[in-house]
Image (cartoon, grey):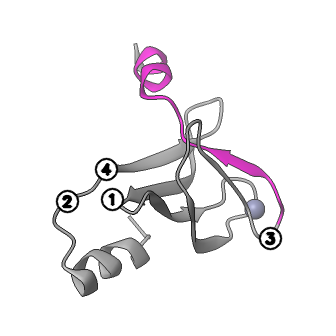
Amino acid sequence: MILTRITQYIKDHGVKSYVYHTWRDLEDEGGNKKGELRVLVLEDNTARVEYKCPECGHEAYEEKPWKRPFNVKCQKCSCLIRVPKLRDQVKKKK
Ligand SMILES: [Zn+2]
């Protein structure tokens, strides 16, 4: 795991409860890990998003309003990074 900004945020602000939290590996179609995505949503309905872009490897952190379906655009290559549905990932591993 390489992402550290949200871990630091939780520590700095003493976060104890949240609305939504996920930390996913981003894989290509062959199941190879290409990047990472972590999303933390607090009761202010703002998503803290940290990612490693699966396309270009750029790492970044940003805050934006939380809504579903949720996605974030890479600040470097503009590719759209979506929160993978857990259902799809489970299906793939069978
Ligand atoms: Zn990118």
Q: Amino acid at mark 1?
A: Glu
Residue 13 percent across, percent down from the top left: 26, 82
Q: Nearer the viewer, mark 4 or mark 1?
A: 1
Q: Earlier in the sequence, mark 4 or mark 1?
A: 4
Secondary structure at badge 2 equals loop
User: How many residues crowd around disc 2 within 10 Å: few (fewer than 14), some, or many (20 or more)?
Assistant: few
Q: Amino acid at mark 3?
A: Lys
Q: Which residues are magenta?
A: 77-92
Above or below: residue 64 compared with residue 22: below
Disc 2 Cβ-to-ligand 1 distance below 8 Å: no
**Kind of residue at disc 2:** Ser
User: Is residue 78 on the magenta stretch?
Assistant: yes
Residue drawn at the location 55% of the way across and 33% of the way down? 31
Q: Quick one: which residue is furthest to the bottom in this view?
A: 12
The residue under the point 54% across, 41% down is 83
Rendered image: mark on residue 76:
3
Label 1, label 3: how many angstroms apart (C-alpha)? 29 Å
Q: Which residue is mark 1?
A: 43
Residue 19 circle label: 4
Mark 3 → mark 2, Cα distance in angstroms: 32 Å
Describe residue 83's horizontal placement relative to residue 3 as left or right. Answer: right
| Picture quarter with the N terminus | bottom left
Q: Disc 1 vs disc 2: Cβ atoms closer than 8 Å?
A: yes
Ligand 1 quadrant in view: bottom right
Foreground of the two, 81 or 69: 69
Q: Nearer the viewer, mark 1 or mark 3?
A: 1
Tag 4 near tag 1, CB within 8 Å: yes
Q: To which quarter of the image does residue 26 belong? A: top right
